[in-house]
Every structure is written in C-alpha cells, then in structure tokens.
Amino acid sequence: MRKIGFLLFALIFAGSALAQTTATNFNVNDCTGTSHNLFSDLDAGKVIVLVWVMPCGACVGPSLAANSVIQKFAASFPGRISLYLVDDLANTNCTTLSLWAKSNEIPITAAFSDATIKMTDYGTVGMPKIVALAGTGHEIIFNQNSGVDVTLLTGAISKRLISGISEIPATGFNMSLYPNPLTSNTLKLKYISDSSEDVNIDIFNALGSNVKKMALSKVSNGNNEIEIDLGFLSSGVYFFRLTGGRKSGILKLIVNH
C-alpha cells in the first residue's frame, strides 16, 4: 500500500526541480558491503548517475534508457562512469533490489538501500528519479523525475567526460588544419617538425572515442603537409591530436558535410 501511495505522489509531482545546485555527499556501503564516498568518486573525475526506484514496473524503462546512455561511454571511458541503483526510502532489502535489477536486465555498478542517499536533496520526488553528478565542484548536471531525456543526459555526460580533451598548442609542430570547418572530404594537415621522427595522428569524436588513427614514419625535418580522407565522418565536433617524440598538440576540428 505504501508503494502505491508513493507512486501516486510521485506522479503528481513528476518533473524536475532542483533544491540545490550541488550534490550531497554520502559515505555508505552498497549491497555487497563495498564502501562508497560520493565526493571522492567525483573528485577522481567520475560521473555518477543515481537512479532511485521503488522498485516498480514504471521504473524499468527509464532505468534501462539511462543505462544505455552509460554504456555508450563506458567503453571509451572505462571506470569513469557508474550507475548507482538506490531504493527510494531504503525499505526494500538489498536482495529484492538486486534481483529486480537482474530480472529486468538492468546492469548496475552498485545497489544501495540506505536512507542516507535521499532523492529529496535533489528536489521533488519521482519514480524513477534520475540524477547525474560530476566534477570537483560536485555539480548536478542532470535531474529528471519519472522518465529520462536520453538526449539531454547524453549531452550532460559528454561535456564532462571529454573535458580533458581540449585544444593544446602543438609545441614544436606549429600545426594547422584546413579547411576548418571541413565541408569536403579531404582535410589538409600542415605542421613543422624540428627533427626527422615518427608521428602519430589520432582523431576523437565528441564522446572521446578514437575514430581514426594514423602512423607516419620518419617525417621530414621542416615543413610537412599531408591530405587525409575524412569523408566517413558525420558532421560534428572532433579533436585532432598530433604526437611525435615528446611533442604533442590538439586542435578542434569542425566537420560540416
């Protein structure tokens, strides 16, 4: 009866409302007895997605959708993103909660039944309630009740996980890309090498995945120019990295086919 009443309450207040802009720390054990300190995980560069459930039938779809977003990033950013499944009022035991996740094929990093982790710290309640947290400032980057906007969640996570990829001047290379934005299939790379050495090229997409690798053997000392076929790339933002010896540089590339 308690579950039914709570679900009706959640539906009435469905939506997203922030009581605060930063996370509330917790230091608790999950259902396997493993200790978790939220702020320590965020300070280490992780993105934590909290999913509160009763559990209930209406919780399954959004929980699966949130997990599908997480799995898109997990391969490129191993150990950097986690899904924490949390019982709403901590009155569902760990065995029941874990079996519910398993029976509905919802992969989770950890399950919790601990009243310390409160959804009311993040505004109104929802079934499920999905909140994503990131950064050393312990920011709330996503907050939604009774559903999940996959596009918004993907964008919020993407901005945090690729924050370590940005333009870095290529010391010793004097690198340039043109045309940029790239509207054709062929990109020209110009750079200056101060020695004859092997050079590696890596191109990353907005999710941080490496979409192309090239190895150039013993490039010439001095001015160099090569053409690279990038017709396979879809329109979007990419990061072009050139490395050689102890030198490295990254430039942002806009593709607009």
Image: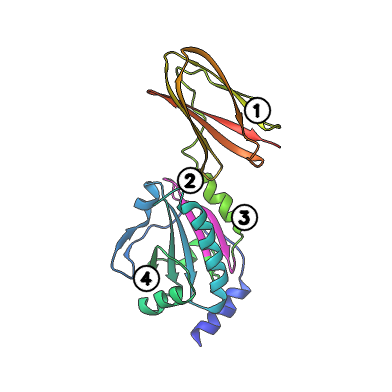
Q: Which amino acid does label 4 sit on?
A: Asp
Viewer-nearest residue: 92 or 179: 179
Viewer-nearest residue: 32 or 126: 32
x then y, percent, for residue 14: 61, 69
The first of marks 2 and 1 along the sequence is: 2
Q: Do the residues labelled 4 and 1 touch (CB within 8 Å)?
A: no
Give yes or no for residue 190 being in the magenta stretch.
no
Q: What residue type is labelled 2?
A: Leu
Would you say 251 lies left or right of 36 here? Answer: right
The first of marks 2 and 4 along the sequence is: 4
Which residue in the structure is indicated by mark 2? 161
Would you say 205 lies left or right of 199 here? Answer: right
Numbered label attached to residue 114:
4
The first of marks 1 and 3 along the sequence is: 3
x then y, percent, for residue 20: 51, 56
- Judge depth for marks 4 and 1 and give the one in front: 1
Numbered label attached to residue 255:
none
- Judge depth for marks 2 and 4 and give the one in front: 2
Where residue 257 sits, quadrant-wise, is top right
Disc 4 to disc 1, C-alpha distance = 51 Å
Disc 2 to disc 1, C-alpha distance = 24 Å
Numbered label attached to residue 151:
3
Local crowd at mark 2 within 10 Å, few (<14), some, or many (≥20)? many
Q: Which residue is drawn at 37% across and 47% down?
A: 44
Which residue in the structure is indicated by mark 1? 180
Q: What residue type is labelled 1?
A: Asn
The first of marks 2 and 3 along the sequence is: 3
Q: Are marks 4 and 3 in contact (CB under 8 Å)?
A: no
Residue 55 can be seen in this image: yes
Disc 1 to disc 3, C-alpha distance = 27 Å
> Magenta segment range?
130-147
Local crowd at mark 4 within 10 Å, few (<14), some, or many (≥20)? many
